[in-house]
Image: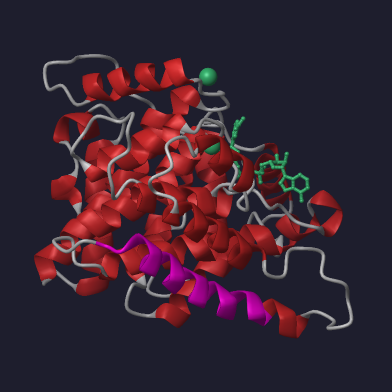
Amino acid sequence: EASVLKNKFRGCLLGSLIGDCTGAPFEGDTISHGDRLVIQRYYDKLEDPTFTAPYKTYTDDTAMMKSVAKFLTDKPEPDYKFLSRLFVNEFFKEPRRGYGQNVIDVFHKLRNTKYENVFKPASEQFMGAGSYGNGGAMRVAPIALYFHDNYKMMLEVASNATKLTHTNVLGVNGALLQAVAIQLAVKCDPYAKIDPERFCIELFRRMRKIERVEEDVDDMEEEDDGTREAYQNKLRVVENLLQRKHDNDLEEEVIMNLGNGISAYESVPTAIYCFLRALNEISYIQTDNVFRRTIQYAVSLGGDTDTIACMAGAIAGAYLGENCINTSLAKQCEYYKEVLEMADNLYVAKEGP
Ligand code: 8NA
Ligand code: MG
Ligand code: MG
Ligand code: MG
């Protein structure tokens, strides 16, 4: 139904924003058991309608997502030169949003070369290896929404939009996995329960196809450097951890085996796990709200908290829709009204008024 889909567009982009804004104060932290209680109280306060505080500011995750949404709504066909200009202009307008060093270098190169070949600067980074950071994945949500009914285009546009800054296969495939997870969540009935293991198996099936494409291009004789089935292997770990839902303290293993870092490889599967784990109760998180449980759990893992919560929040929001997100919590975030407008514009650009 039309209103359900519109609600999912809003939920997804708002979920991404809330994860970024409320996760950012904990970025880079190691979270102890005591800190979990601090984080519980932090979200209790943010959900309290009488609580007043300066809003939580957004970071590079949302800054770049804004450009991706505009790229989709303002032009009838994907225009990557336009998108690279949007990224660069947004960065030079507000450079202090916590961007990674690699993307800052790419933005300078793009500007200095007058956008002559917008895919070249990123491809030259890290001595030609390209970035495997999670920056492609953290901003991919609008593409997954816009192409929710066109899987092939979704993969193509998500891949190209990522390659403007991240060309390493792990960076690109991480963004594709995040897009696939959001698209799958959009398709799920918000009033029906998701089976976490089935959701994970479906992601695995799709990553097998995506990671096979690389295999055809590569020299078959070449030794496997561990990247060829990287995300399939990670999803096996996700599935295994989900099966152990009755084990109490899995968090150390989650951090050790899935990761909580700034590489796509060590954060996208983690974000997916956060969403699937939070569909059921978690002992040290007191809330009935699945969306809140998702981002609170992501933040409680520490590390790249803003980005992992942003990605997990986008998936949860795409499943549940805006009406399952606490309004007081949303209102604590900088730019929340604009993000809802952005979601509506994206919806209209796609589905019509
Ligand atoms: P990015 O492309 O700059 O990647 C992030 C970092 O990962 C780089 O600066 C490198 O240190 C490292 N890296 C990536 N690819 C390679 C490679 N091939 N070889 C060696 N090192 C590599 O930035 P991004 O847009 O991917 O953003 C990633 C994260 O950084 C986001 O979470 C974002 O919020 C940001 N960030 C993180 C922190 C933090 O301490 N956790 C602080 C500020 C910004
Ligand atoms: Mg800190
Ligand atoms: Mg950030
Ligand atoms: Mg981050």
Q: Please tell me whether residue 37 is drawn above or below residue 131 in the rendered image.
A: above
Q: Which residue shows up at 32% across the image and 38% down it?
A: 282
Q: Please tell me whether residue 40 is drawn above or below residue 73 in the rendered image.
A: above
User: Residue 110 versus residue 314: which sits nearer the camera?
Assistant: 314
**Which portion, as a residue range, is magenta?**
194-213
Q: Which residue shows up at 24% across the image and 44% down it?
A: 290
Q: Which residue shows up at 12% across the image and 70% down it?
A: 2
Q: Does residue 237 appear to the left or right of 52 in the view shown?
A: right
Specify the principal SS of the magenta part: helix
Residue 81 horizontal/vertical position (percent): 57, 63
Q: How many marks?
A: 0
Q: Quadrant of residue 182?
A: bottom left
Q: Please tell me whether residue 105 is drawn above or below residue 269 in the rendered image.
A: above
User: Residue 297 versus residue 116: which sits nearer the camera?
Assistant: 297
Residue 301 horizontal/vertical position (percent): 49, 33
Quadrant where the N terminus sits is bottom left
Q: Residue furthest front?
A: 246
Rendering colour mode: secondary structure
Q: Does residue 224 appear to the left or right of 168 in the view shown?
A: right
Q: Quadrant of residue 262?
A: top right
Q: Quadrant of residue 209?
A: bottom right
Quadrant where the C terminus sits is bottom left
| Residue 50 highlighted magenta (yes or no) | no
User: Residue 7 versus residue 73: which sits nearer the camera?
Assistant: 7
From this viewpoint, is residue 29 visible?
yes
Q: Which residue shows up at 59% across the image and 59% down it?
A: 234
From this viewpoint, is residue 72 visible?
no
Residue 107 horizontal/vertical position (percent): 65, 46
Residue 165 horizontal/vertical position (percent): 64, 54
User: Residue 284 versus residue 97: which sits nearer the camera?
Assistant: 284
| Residue 201 highlighted magenta (yes or no) | yes
